[in-house]
Every structure is written in C-alpha cells, then in structure tokens.
Amino acid sequence: MTSATPEMRTLVGIVVPSRNEAAVIERCLAGLGAQVGVMRIRVIVCVNGTTDDTATIAREAALTHQSLDIIVIEINFPSKTSALNAGDALINDADVRIYLDADLELSPTTVASLCTALASDEPLIAQPTRSIADDTRSWGRIAAWALITLPWVAQDIACGGIFAVNRAGRARWAEFPLIAADDAFAIGQFAAHERRVVAGCSATHPMPPSLRGLFAQQKRWGEARAALARSEFNAPHGSAWRASRRVKSLVSSPKIIVAAIIIRLIRLGAEWSSSTLKSDSWVVEREPVRRTS
C-alpha cells in the first residue's frame, strides 16, 4: 500500500463571504473546482444578509463541483465580519486557510502554489499575483493597470479580496474584529519577511468600468482603512514599502509615475465626490442567526 504524500494530507479551508453575489458565485466556485493538485479543499460559503439567490446557486454548485467539500451558511443580516468568523469556525482543522471574496476567480494552480509557499512552521501570509479580468473595460482597465504597475501593490501583500495563512499565521489573532478592513487587519499582523507574493498563479479582480464606480470603490476602501487606523485593532506592521523606497521606485520609472498619478487622481475624485457617493458597510454588531447545509 502506498502511503499518502504530505500534499494529500493537506486540508485547505476556504472562506467565501457572500452578499448578493448571485452573478459571480458560480464562477468563483468553478475556479476552485478547477484547482490542480491533490490537496483536500473545504469551502465555506457564508451568505450574509443577501436578497438574491446566492445561497441557492452555491448549493447547486456543491452538486456540480464534487471535488470540493462545499458548506453553505446563511446569516440573516449583512456582516462580512460575522460571515468570516462563522466560516472560520468550520475550518479549525485546516492546515492552510484562504479568505476569498466571491467576485474573484483563481487560476488553476493558485491553491497548490499558496500551500507550497505556506509550508512552514513559521507564521506566514501569502497572496497570488493580480490579473485583470478580460471583460474589464474603460476606466476600470486603466485603474487596474495602474494598481498592478505600482511595485508597492504588486510586490507586497495588498488588500484585494484574497489572502492565505498557515496554522502559525492564523494563530496571530483570535476572531476577526468588527471592522470593515478585515484584509488590512490580517496583513498588518505580519512583518515584511513573513509575507509571500506567489508567482505562477493569479487572482482575477473585477474593476468598476465607470469613474463613479471607481470613486465609490475608493471611498469604501478609504473609509475602511481610516476606521482601522482609529480603532484599537490597528495592526503593528505597515507596508514593506516605506516612503523613501516608494520615491526611489517612482524616480526610476516614468511608467510607475504615470500609474501613481492615475491612482492619486482617482482617490482625489473619491474625496471630492464623497457627498454624493453611498458607502456600503458590511459591519453589524450582533451575533449571526445562521442555517448550514
């Protein structure tokens, strides 16, 4: 009898908080079902405060993608924090944990590559490289190009809908706190030498096609970062790219200067338009009532 390899024994737990994601949840789960490698994957879809068919579609996907162990949780109010914590409780035995937004799609080698990068007794956090969705248009494509051109985004763990940690890394905090910037909070628990951006795999990120959509997105991100900075949960580690390093990078490449100007103008536009933009908070300070299937 052939004994199981370490990869075969690896259990990967993936938490997918989902609110009104009926249009994208099947694509996200299909990407997980197409992962190559021999690890075991348990996916917890945490549907919270939804008003569409996200939960139904996720349950149907569980029948289609039988290589995955998909569990669907329903919480009766919108709260990404509660969704993350409820999902986390069902993957306590996982060797690697991945936190994934429902509108992202992973390349087939992503989960295996993240597991390889996190194979250590030392606390680590990892993230795949970013790619631009083929159907991204107009201002969304310009903004996406600018983001992935900035080295302090492309070469450091950045907020963007996905991060993965090993057992030692997940021990850095207890539950996710009641803040909107959950990814910034988690990333900030790790020093620069404990972060891994993994080449050879990618997460496809959707971007709003209009300037107004980009402004609203930037407003939401800005509010979340500001709230984290004001809170008691502000993390000890910032970006690995300090101001002096960013300046050196800027002056070395006109392309990086252009990218930085584009992102700065979008952020200024979000500030100028803030009075007419609606922010959507996922944080609700109460315990979830949930159904599991």
Image (cartoon, grey):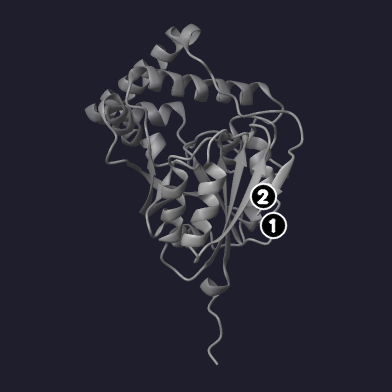
Q: Are marks 1 and 2 in contact (CB under 8 Å)?
A: yes
Q: Where is residue 59 shown, x and y percent of the image? A: 55, 53
Q: Position of residue 162 (x, y in %)?
A: 49, 44
Residue 131 figure quarter: top left
- In the rendered image, which residue does mark 1 sit on? 92
State the residue position of label 2: 88
Label 2 element class: helix
Tell me the kind of residue under disc 1: Asn
- Please tell me whether mark 1 sits on a helix, a strand or a loop: loop
Q: Is residue 172 visible?
A: no
Q: Residue at x 25, y 26 (%)?
A: 138
Rendered location of residue 205, percent (x, y) = 39, 39
Q: Is residue 15 above or below residue 19?
A: below
For the question of whether residue 250 can be seen, the reply is yes
- Outermost residue toward the bottom in this view: 1
Residue appearing at x 40%, y 35% in the figure = 152
Q: Position of residue 253 (x, y in %)?
A: 25, 30
Determine which quarter of the picture holds residue 97: bottom right
Q: Quadrant of the N terminus?
A: bottom right
